[in-house]
Image: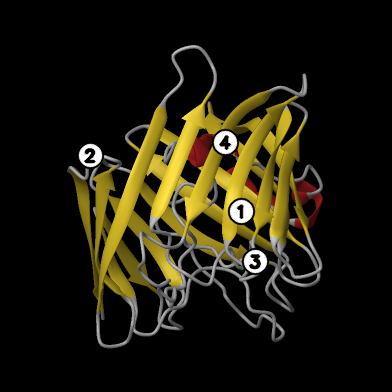
Amino acid sequence: MKQLFTFMLVASVLLFSSCSKDYLSTPTENPTINYGTNGGISTGPLTLMPKLVKHGDRTLTYVHTGDLSSVTYNNGYKTFYSELNNRGPATHVTTNTYQGDTTTRFLYELSSNGLAKSIRYEELKNGEWDELFEDDYTYNTSKQLTKISNSSGHYDFVYNADGDVTSITYINWQNKLIMETYFWYTSGNSAVIDDKNKINPDDLWIDQYLKIFGKFRKHLPRRIKYSNYLPNGAKTDFRYDYVLNADGLIKTEKKYYSPSNVLAETKSYEYQ
């Protein structure tokens, strides 16, 4: 499921008419990032003080303004972040990912309130960008993402009164339930834990480091259960424990298989 968001997000066809042709046609592993002014809109790459520099197997680097520049993965992926049309408020954000000879990118178009309204996913083939997917985003009056949709189906997000996402379902174009994920924020009699981290939650099919999708939760999840109803579809059920630092940010995240409580993964967070 962690890999799914990398391949299902996409952006509006209108993006080509509003972005620089030279920028779109020639990718670079060391892009010139012009953040300019955001006109007071809080959008674009992650800014976090103190800066998150290690996130599990990922290493994060920043430009002098404090905005995220790149994320390097142990599996060979490297993603660069930049904003476009920054003579005024940011209108687009792009991420370029390199793995060996493969180059892909997400092109996000932003609405006037700084939220992603559409995204296009493309792969560079023979010097030209080949569009693979295109999605649109819908939000509620609280600026929470409620739907990701395209011609194949839609993801629907449900939140509780605290503002925490409690479920995500995927319905295909035949109106058939394909996948669903449920989130719990308490474990047994334990109290909820405030989420002071600025990255987006894992397993939501979005980039974890872009602040353009609204706020998904106020608390840290203690259990996440995922079900894929396709033949041979995966089903997972995990419980989470956290060690926080003095600032209330995650220092260590431990994931256990539920209900066996066998440790599945330990993820460390390091800050600068």
User: Which residue is tagged 2?
Assistant: 260
Foreground residue, 39 or 263?
Answer: 263
Nearest-to-viewer mark from 3 and 2: 2
The residue at 35%/59% (across/down) is 188
Mark 2, other Cα within 10 Å: few <14 / some 14–19 / many ≥20: few
The residue at 70%/63% (across/down) is 144
Answer above or below: position of 221 versus 63: above
Q: Quadrant of the N terminus?
A: top left
User: Which residue is tagged 3?
Assistant: 214
- Say the numbered circle drawn on residue 180: 4
The mark nearer the N terminus, 2 or 4, is 4
x, y percent for residue 183: 50, 51
Answer above or below: position of 157 versus 164: above
* Amino acid type shown at disc 3: Gly
Looking at the image, can residue 199 be seen?
A: yes
Q: CA distance from mark 2 to mark 4?
A: 22 Å
Q: CA distance from mark 2 to mark 1?
A: 51 Å
> What secondary structure is found at the residue carrying circle 3?
loop
Nearest-to-viewer mark from 2 and 1: 2
Q: CA distance from mark 1 to mark 3?
A: 27 Å
Mark 1, other Cα within 10 Å: few <14 / some 14–19 / many ≥20: few
> What secondary structure is found at the residue carrying circle 1?
helix
Q: CA distance from mark 3 to mark 2?
A: 34 Å
Labels 2 & 4 near each other (Cβ < 8 A): no
* Amino acid type shown at disc 2: Ser
> What secondary structure is found at the residue carrying circle 2?
loop
User: Which residue is tagged 1?
Assistant: 23
Q: CA distance from mark 3 to mark 4?
A: 21 Å
Nearest-to-viewer mark from 1 and 4: 4
